[in-house]
């Protein structure tokens, strides 16, 4: 079955195994790309070691998925409840066992449905180890609240430079999870993959039909991966200042506007020509920046930084 799935897909096949270590061992006899287990529910250290040894033999990477909801009972008793130190202690134990086996091809997740627990767990983990992390707020619920909740939890982690892969957990259809993940990465500037529109909320001073202009602009920018910042503001109060900060900007007046490029005025346009004029500037920017902007640094491997916290 796994071989058949692998033949039919063009993305990596990752097996997420719960409870039964024999299923994990069996999965690795098939052409999979990665395995994910929660060592806390796989039946003890010996079984975990067997999974590690096989992953090492097969050259497969593994995600060690620690979850606040399924921590080892002794750690919950020791710490009083499934708190961030208990989650991190669990992860570090399993990393030490993996290192004992000479296996380092791991990524760690420390999931919680509670934003503060997740943020504190990832921050604490980063003090002890730099194996890469998979980040997410688990069981976030139904969009749009779940997207906001995920952004609240992931933004502090991402802005600290933590996080190498990401999952947004939304009720139902998984496809919107991808757009939400890209938006969170874009907003935190960890992975800028589309133009950024800076648009005012509008108010009584508005001097153009800003919503119509933005709708046209979004349509014409759709599918572009250019990491250009475009500011579009509806009047002369904040427009010139914001436009100067962006790569390209327009400050609108009464039915007309001024286009800025890198802070300099380059053109005066009428409202009807604004979208065309901005798109010309975007195309010029793309020609001048064929490689976009420098990417955020990527992860360069992992290790335990400090010994396991005192038992
Ligand atoms: S930029 Fe002008 S129109 Fe837009 S919200 Fe600010 S004051 Fe109002």
Image (spheres, rainbow, N blue to C red):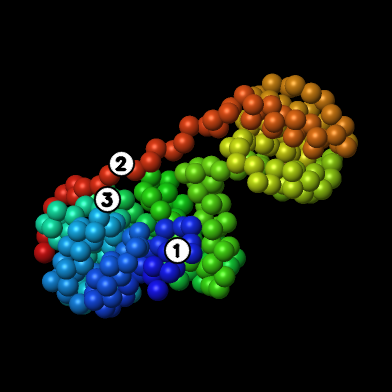
Residue 277 visible from this viewpoint: yes
The foreground one among 198 and 185 is: 185
Circle 1 Cα neighbour tier, 10 Å, few/some/many (<14 / 14–19 / ≥20): few
Circle 2 Cα neighbour tier, 10 Å, few/some/many (<14 / 14–19 / ≥20): few
The foreground one among 12 and 280 is: 12
Q: CA distance from mark 1 to mark 2?
A: 31 Å
Query: In the rendering, at what x and y percent does residue 175 appear?
Result: 57, 64
Q: Is residue 115 left or right of residue 87?
A: right
Residue for point 14% across, 53% down = 102
Above or below for 158 versus 136: above
**Tag 2's secondary structure?**
loop
**Tag 3's secondary structure?**
loop
Q: CA distance from mark 2 to mark 3?
A: 9 Å
Residue for point 28% across, 67% down = 29
Q: Is residue 254 left or right of residue 140?
A: right
Residue for point 24% across, 76% down = 22
Nearer mark to the viewer, of 1 and 2: 1
| Image quadrant where one finds the C terminus | bottom left
Query: Between disc 2 and disc 3, whose residue precedes?
Result: 3
Residue hosting label 2: 300
Judge: label 2 CB < 8 Å from ligand 1. no
Circle 3 Cα neighbour tier, 10 Å, few/some/many (<14 / 14–19 / ≥20): many
Residue for point 54% across, 67% down = 174
The foreground one among 305 and 239 is: 305
Residue hosting label 1: 7
Query: Between disc 3 and disc 1, whose residue precedes?
Result: 1
Nearer mark to the viewer, of 3 and 1: 1
Residue hosting label 3: 131
Above or below for 7 versus 72: above
Above or below for 234 versus 244: below
Above or below for 291 versus 83: above
Query: In the rendering, at what x and y percent does residue 298 appear?
Result: 38, 41
């Amino acid at each position: 079955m796994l071989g058949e799935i692998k033949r039919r897909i063009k993305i990596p096949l990752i097996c997420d195994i719960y409870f039964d270590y024999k299923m994990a061992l069996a999965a690795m006899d098939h052409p999979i790309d990665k395995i994910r287990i929660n060592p806390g529910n796989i039946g003890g250290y010996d079984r975990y070691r067997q999974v590690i040894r096989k992953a090492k033999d097969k050259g497969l990477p593994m995600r060690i998925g620690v979850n606040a909801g399924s921590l080892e009972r002794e750690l919950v008793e020791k710490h009083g409840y499934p708190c961030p130190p208990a989650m991190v202690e669990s992860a570090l134990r399993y990393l030490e066992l993996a290192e004992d086996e000479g296996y380092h091809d791991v990524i760690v997740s420390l999931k919680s449905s509670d934003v503060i627990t997740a943020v504190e767990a990832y921050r604490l983990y980063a003090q002890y180890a730099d194996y890469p992390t998979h980040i997410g707020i688990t069981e976030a619920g139904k969009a749009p609240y779940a997207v906001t909740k995920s952004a609240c939890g992931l933004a502090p982690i991402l802005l600290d430079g933590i996080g190498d892969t990401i999952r947004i957990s939304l009720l139902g259809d998984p496809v919107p999870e991808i757009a939400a993940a890209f938006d969170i990465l874009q907003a935190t500037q960890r992975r800028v993959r589309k133009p950024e529109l800076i648009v005012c909320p509008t108010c009584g001073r508005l001097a153009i039909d800003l919503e119509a202009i933005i709708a046209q602009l979004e349509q014409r920018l759709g599918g572009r991966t250019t990491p250009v910042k475009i500011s579009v503001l509806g009047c002369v109060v904040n427009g010139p200042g914001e436009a100067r900060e962006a790569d390209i900007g327009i400050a609108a007046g009464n039915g007309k506007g001024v286009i800025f490029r890198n802070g300099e005025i380059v053109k005066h346009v009428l409202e009807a020509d604004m979208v065309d004029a901005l798109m010309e500037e975007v195309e010029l920017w793309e020609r001048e920046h064929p490689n976009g902007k420098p990417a955020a640094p990527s992860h360069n491997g992992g290790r335990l930084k400090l010994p396991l916290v005192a038992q």
